Structures are given as structure tokens and as C-alpha cells.
Amino acid sequence: MWSLATTPHVVSAAGDVGAARIGLFGGTFDPVHFGHLRPAVELREAYDLNTLYLLPNHRPVHRGPARANTAHRIAMLELSIDRAKSVSIDTREALRDKPSYTYDTLSEIRREQPHATLVFFMGMDAFAKYDTWHEWEAILGMANLVVVKRPQALHSTFSAKLLARQQERLGTTIRNGESGVIEECDVTQLSISATDIRERIAKRRTVRFLLPDAVSEYIVSNGLYQSNHD
């Protein structure tokens, strides 16, 4: 197993040049599955992105620690996006040995790409708690938000008011060179959860058709999620 210090194929969003449209899709990916991957490719197409970057985090701020270590989760992501058009990985959050904030990530990318149009994707459940995010107002000065609708996930009073405020100020469509627009969108909803996958593996049940075969094989060969306590 390679270490984080020698992670291969570390991709930074700074690699794009010019006035690109860059998408950012964060998550723990513990493990990555089709419930992550299908929405990712749909969002890349829907928003005409030059590249959609998957952003695995190392120490999630809003949830407990990941079960698989960061190196394993990056390796599984690499396998999952093999030959996927214009979908790549940005490991900057994974390589931070401290809680990782979206504000810090966007600040870095904005310095690297001052002319890019940044589109940050988040689920409705996360957006409902957006007022708890570090420097949430400043994030809107750097990027646009796309809120992915999810079954049973509803707006909070705060998020509904914020959506209305931003759409009144800036409209409902993300335009090149702008930031602060908040859109809502629908994607194909696959009722797959990483928690369920981990539980199935611990109980020696099949996870076929829930995640890419290459990822499933990697989990087996590395003995990941074999118990509920590892």
C-alpha cells in the first residue's frame, strides 16, 4: 500500500488553465459507490464542466472519522473513475492533516484559478445546515452552489431564505465568471449508502451492483470493512 506522501496521480484543480468551469464534489467516499458516481457524471454534463473534481476529505468536519484510511479511499476513487470523461480527483483536502474546510479549499483554488467559474455541489441535507459551515458567506463570494435534491431532505428556514435571497440578487442560472448563484437540481437517485455497504461486507453479504467491480475487488484484497469495528 502506498502512503499519502507518495500518492500517485494526485490531481489539482490548478491544472486547468483559462476561464474554465470547474465542479467540486466532496465526500468521504468510504467506500465510493454508484450513488456517488452516477450523480457525478450527470452533474458534469448538466453544468458543462471542463472537469468535475471529486474531493475526498481526510478529517470530515461534520461527521465522524472514515473507516478506511485516506490512502485506501483515494485508491478506490482512482479505480472507480478509470476512463470516466472529465472526472478527476483533487486530493488537497485528503492531504491536510487537520479538519478540512470548504472555505480553505475554495480559497486555494480561487488563487490558482482567478478566472475560473467554480461550481460546488452539495446535498439538500447539507445545505439545510449551511449556516453551520465555516465562513459560509465568504464561500458565496468565491463559488456558485448547486444543491442536489434528495428524498425526504427539506430546506431549513435558513436555507430557504438564503436561496430566495441569492436568486433575487443574482438569478437562477450560473453564468461564466460569476459566483454566488445558488441552483437546485435533480439527479438520478440511487438508494445506496456507504454505511449499508460496509455492514454488508462485515456480514459477508454480496455488494455486487452497488459499486464498481474494481472497487469491490480492492476491498476484498485489502481486507477492508471486514468487521463492524475495524
Image (cartoon, grey):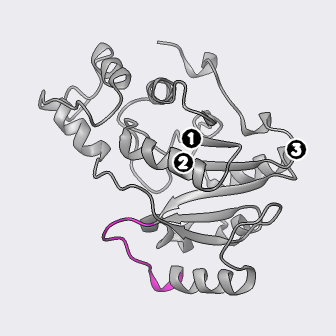
Foreground disc of the pair 3, 1: 3
Residue depicted at x 70% and y 64%:
139
Instruction: Compare marks 1 and 2 and give the one earlier in the sequence.
Output: 2
Mark 3 touching mark 2, by CB under 8 A?
Answer: no
Residue 98, given in percent of the width and then of the height, sits at 58, 42
Q: In which quadrant will I find the C terminus?
A: top left
Q: Main secondary structure of the magenta part?
A: loop
Q: Nearer the viewer, residue 191 or 223?
A: 191
For numbered disc 2, what is the local secondary structure?
A: strand
Residue assigned mark 2 = 26
Q: Which mark is residue 54?
A: 1
Instruction: Compare marks 3 and 1 and give the one earlier in the sequence.
Output: 3
For disc 3, the neighbor class at 10 Å (few under 14, some 14 to 19, many from 20) is few
Rendering quarter of residue 141: bottom right
Q: Amino acid at mark 1?
A: Leu
Q: CA distance from mark 3 to mark 2?
A: 23 Å
Q: Amino acid at mark 3?
A: Gly
Residue assigned mark 3 = 18
Relative to 225, 5 lies left or right? right
Image vertical order of residue 215 relative to residue 151, above or below: above
For disc 1, the neighbor class at 10 Å (few under 14, some 14 to 19, many from 20) is many
Q: Nearer the viewer, residue 125 or 107?
A: 125
Q: Is residue 56 magenta?
A: no
For numbered disc 3, what is the local secondary structure?
A: loop
Residue 107, given in percent of the width and then of the height, sits at 76, 53
Q: Is residue 150 magenta?
A: yes
Q: Which residues are magenta?
A: 149-158
Residue depicted at x 73% and y 68%:
138
For disc 2, the neighbor class at 10 Å (few under 14, some 14 to 19, many from 20) is some
For numbered disc 1, what is the local secondary structure?
A: strand
